[in-house]
Amino acid sequence: MTTITATTAPPRLRKRVGAGRRQWIGLLYVAPAVALVMLFFVIPLGMTAWMSLHNWPLMGEHSFIGLGNYWAILRDTRFWNALRFTGYYTLIVTIAIFAVAFPLAIFIERPRPFTNLYRTMFFMPAVVGFASASLLWSWLLNVDSGLFSPAAYDLGLIDKKFNLLATFQPAFWSIIAMVVWKVAGFTMIILMTGLQSIPQDLQEAAVIDGAGPFARFRAITLPLMRRTLALALILSVAGSILAFDQFYIILRGGPRNQTLTAVYWIFNQSFVSFKLGYGAALSMVLLVILVALSLVQLWLLRKPEGLD
């Protein structure tokens, strides 16, 4: 009777056994990540979807109502107004972030004196949490004890102290300024890595051919940065749609509920009115909108065929 060992087995069988062993080892390596995703994303998502089908008060028994919460969303004008404002805010803040981050990324891309210092300075606000940044700017914007309005009054730039948070336009643009200060450095780093991945030979060849800076930017930089731009754009849009901290801490939805965001309204319905089932339904609707927008952005910024 002949016993087949690892050394006497046919080469094809040894290769198959080795491949199977590598697959199991690979599964063991990814198992912790899969467990974390299941625990903190898949299971909570399933629970949220299940809650959205119920009348789920904070106290007492919950009851199954099917799509009742979703039908109620169609009649919730406050939610649609909040969603409209969220879309407007997302559009403005995304343009503002890229308008600041792209020039900064171009400026710090190539080594020059104090480049590391510039990179650190521009990126530093990104390490501050949104809640902490909102508290800081809430103080800076205070009409009496803050910095902006009292400093402008002391310098004689205004006749009397002006409350930047009393009306919609100054309050809205104050939030935009805070978010750009907070996020532009992070977006700058993402764009800088995309710029550094562009082969320098292409830029030099274009210069030899007589292409100017704008022509090189349009014909070389933008096409080769599509994936980087897609990543930065998706992160910016997703973060803007989920905006909550700055509007809650600085404005509390004011003035006159004009700065209610979609997440703020979900928070209000879930943890102020204690309609947990309705809040879960609102969350699922916002998730669908967010996924759809991300897919559209990926499609618009897809890599053209034949472009390596």
Image: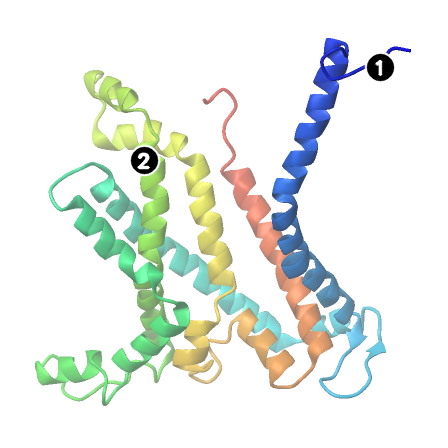
Q: Residues within 10 Å of mark 2 (few under 14, many from 20)?
A: many
- How far is the residue under mark 1 from the one under mark 2? 60 Å
- The answer to the question of whether label 1 and label 2 lie on touching residues, with beta carbons closer than 8 A, is no
Q: Secondary structure at mark 1?
A: loop
Q: Which mark is residue 254?
A: none
x, y percentage for residue 48?
A: 71, 67
User: Which residue is at 21% across, 43% downward?
Assistant: 107
User: Which residue is at 63% across, 53% downward?
Assistant: 37
Q: Quadrant of the N terminus?
A: top right
Q: Nearer the viewer, mark 1 or mark 2?
A: 1
Q: Which of 277/26 is in front? A: 26
In the rendered view, how is the structure colored?
rainbow
- Can residue 75 be seen from the camera position used here? no
Q: Which residue is mark 2?
A: 195
Q: Quadrant of the C terminus?
A: top left
User: Which residue is at 32% across, 72% downward?
Assistant: 174
User: Which residue is at 14% across, 39% downward?
Assistant: 112
Q: Is residue 48 left or right of residue 212?
A: right
Q: Which of 226/44 is in front? A: 44
Report which quarter residue 64 is drawn in.
bottom right
Sequence-first disc among 1 and 2: 1
Name above or below for residue 62 compared with residue 35: below
